[in-house]
């Protein structure tokens, strides 16, 4: 897909990996909808930065736990920037949920943001893409999701479900729309990680370094550019899943 003149919606685009994806799409000519929830200042700063480069960009606030807000987000983006050609479901909840304190709230929050929101946005925007005859959807998974990590039960389940959702939508929306998943590994040091924690992660990463957000953005661009890849998960983890 040629991105010039196309509209791309990136959820959770104000910071970190989402910011890199939004910047990469804008750099290839897309009009970018920068979604955010609690990071208003960062989202507005990114929009200003993209506009300085000559790109078209707008910021859109929405709580992805709210189905009504999700429908409004999709409609607002299309009203302000035109039909969405590329959807990147990047936003994610990621925090420890130890079993002894795990409850309904943590389960519902992880499933709502990490799985239900991509489902509802893909359903609404994917149908419209199919009617127009073209579109791309890329979900952001996790390279270690299929191998349960202690204290992250709802998160892991939500990310495994996202892979299944990717494959299901790839079949439902074919041949017009390609739906894929990018599964990052050690891209950035975890927030609050000590030097010892970081060294432990890198010791189990064959390439021996953190990949950086651009590695994920490049993978997204690859899947958006390809017209013969659908229903697949592209792992971007420096080989850590081999260990």
Image (cartoon, helix red, strand yellow):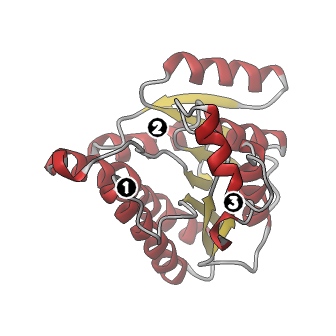
Q: Give the mark nearest the N terminus, 3 or 2.
A: 2
Q: Is residue 94 left or right of residue 103?
A: right
Q: Is residue 16 left or right of residue 76?
A: right
- Identify the residue at horizontal 78%, vertical 53% (top origin): 208
Residue 2 in percent (x, y) is at 82, 58
- From the viewer's perspective, is the residue at label 3 or at label 2 nearer? 3
Mark 3 vs mark 2, CA separation in Å = 35 Å
Q: Secondary structure at mark 1?
A: helix
Query: Around disc 1, counting alpha carbons within 10 Å, would you say few (fewer than 14), some (14 to 19), or many (20 or more)?
Result: many
Q: Give the mark nearest the N terminus, 3 or 1.
A: 1
Q: Which residue is mark 1?
A: 155
Q: Residue 95: in sight, yes or no?
A: yes
Q: Are marks 3 and 2 in contact (CB under 8 Å)?
A: no
Mark 1 vs mark 2, CA separation in Å = 29 Å
Residue 147 in percent (x, y) is at 46, 70
Q: Secondary structure at mark 2?
A: helix
Q: Which residue is mark 3?
A: 237
Q: Secondary structure at mark 3?
A: loop
Residue 216 in percent (x, y) is at 71, 52
Q: Is residue 138 above or below residue 24?
A: below
* Figure quadrant of the N terminus: bottom right
Residue 109 in percent (x, y) is at 27, 46
Q: Which residue is mark 2?
A: 76
């Amino acid at each position: 897909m040629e991105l010039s003149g196309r509209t791309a919606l990136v959820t959770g685009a104000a910071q970190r990996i989402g910011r890199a994806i939004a910047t990469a799409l804008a750099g290839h000519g897309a009009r970018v909808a920068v979604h955010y929830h609690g990071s208003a200042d960062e989202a507005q700063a990114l929009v200003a930065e993209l506009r300085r480069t000559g790109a078209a960009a707008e910021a859109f606030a929405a709580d992805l736990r709210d189905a009504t807000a999700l429908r409004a987000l999709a409609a607002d983006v299309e009203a302000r920037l035109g039909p969405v050609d590329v959807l990147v479901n990047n936003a994610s909840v990621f925090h420890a949920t130890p079993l002894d304190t795990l409850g309904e709230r943590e389960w519902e929050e992880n499933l709502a943001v990490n799985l239900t929101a991509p489902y509802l946005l893909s359903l609404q925007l994917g149908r419209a893409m199919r009617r127009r005859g073209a579109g791309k959807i890329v979900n952001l998974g996790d390279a270690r999701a299929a191998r349960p990590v202690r204290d992250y039960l709802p998160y892991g389940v939500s990310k495994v479900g996202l892979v299944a959702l990717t494959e299901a939508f790839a079949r439902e929306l074919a041949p017009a729309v390609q739906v894929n998943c990018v599964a990052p590994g050690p891209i950035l040091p975890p927030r609050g990680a000590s030097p010892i924690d970081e060294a432990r992660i890198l010791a189990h990463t064959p390439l021996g370094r953190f990949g950086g957000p651009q590695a994920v953005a490049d993978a997204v661009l690859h899947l958006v550019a390809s017209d013969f890849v659908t229903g697949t998960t592209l792992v971007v983890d420096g080989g850590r899943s081999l260990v």
